Every structure is written in C-alpha cells, then in structure tokens.
C-alpha cells in the first residue's frame, strides 16, 4: 500500500509539474503573440501614416494642377480678348484707310497748289 501511495504521489507531482510547464509555455506563447501583435500594430500605423502622407502629397499635386489649369484658361481668355481687340483695331484702321498698301502720302497744300496754279 505504501508503494501504491508513493506511485500516486509521484504521478500527482509529475502531473503538477506538467501542468505548471504547460501553463508557463502557454503564458510565454501568449506574451510572444502579444509582442508580435504590437509589432504588427506599429508597422500598420507607420504604413497608414505613409499612406496619409502620400494622399496629402497627391492632393497638393492635384490642387497645383487645378491652379495651373485655371491660370491657363484665364490666359487663353485674355489672349482671345486681345485678338478681338486687335481685330477691332484692324477694322477701324481699314475704315480710316481702306487701302493701306498705297504708301504715297499726298500733302493737301501741294495738291491745292497744283490744281489752282
């Protein structure tokens, strides 16, 4: 009976040791997973920050492009207005002198002397 009691005590001690070892490995595994999860969270946050930075840069580039487009449109409108002004000035010049290729300028006083004289 003593031998049976001794065997039972040894089995219980071994079971307790196995249970403690299993719990220790479980807690180590849990701690290792927590550390891995923390690393993943840090990398995820860094990646998200990089993505936010890239998005902000893209937004800035799009805004610059939009400003450039608007400036180009304004410049085009101004050029069209200048063309219109130039066409109006040509029309007025043609009204005043319909034959601009005739470069002879006749002095009215000379013309009057030759016809009167």
Image (spheres, helix red, strand yellow):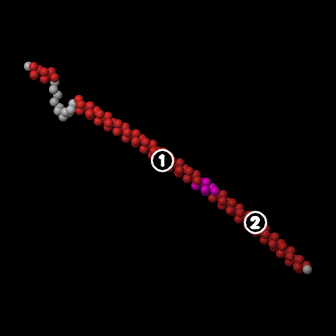
Dot 2 corresponds to which residue?
A: 24
Mark pair 2, 1: CA separation: 56 Å
Q: Are marks 2 and 1 in contact (CB under 8 Å)?
A: no
Which residue lies at the image location 66% right of the left edge and 59% below the top edge?
37
Is 2 situated above or below 49? Answer: below
Report whether 84 appears left or right of 115: right
State the image coordinates of residue 8 (x, y, percent, origin top left): 86, 76
Can you tell which mark lies on residue 62?
1
- Residue positioned 88% across, 79% down in the render: 4
Where residue 113 sits, quadrant-wise, is top left
Q: Would you say 75 lies left or right of 27 here?
A: left
Q: Is residue 40 left or right of residue 1?
A: left
Rendered image quadrant of residue 111: top left
Q: Which residues are magenta?
A: 41-47
- In the picture, which quadrant includes the N terminus? bottom right
Q: Residues within 10 Å of mark 1 (few under 14, many from 20)?
A: few
């Amino acid at each position: 009976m003593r031998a049976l009691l001794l065997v039972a005590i040894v089995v219980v001690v071994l079971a307790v040791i196995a249970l403690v070892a299993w719990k220790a490995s479980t807690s180590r595994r849990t701690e290792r997973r927590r550390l891995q999860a923390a690393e993943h969270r840090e990398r995820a946050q860094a990646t998200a920050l990089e993505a936010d930075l890239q998005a902000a840069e893209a937004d800035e580039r799009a805004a610059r492009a939009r400003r450039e487009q608007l400036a180009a449109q304004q410049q085009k409108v101004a050029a069209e207005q200048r063309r219109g002004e130039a066409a109006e000035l040509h029309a007025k010049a043609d009204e005043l002198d319909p034959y601009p290729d005739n470069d002879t300028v006749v002095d009215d006083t000379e013309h009057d002397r030759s016809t009167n004289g």
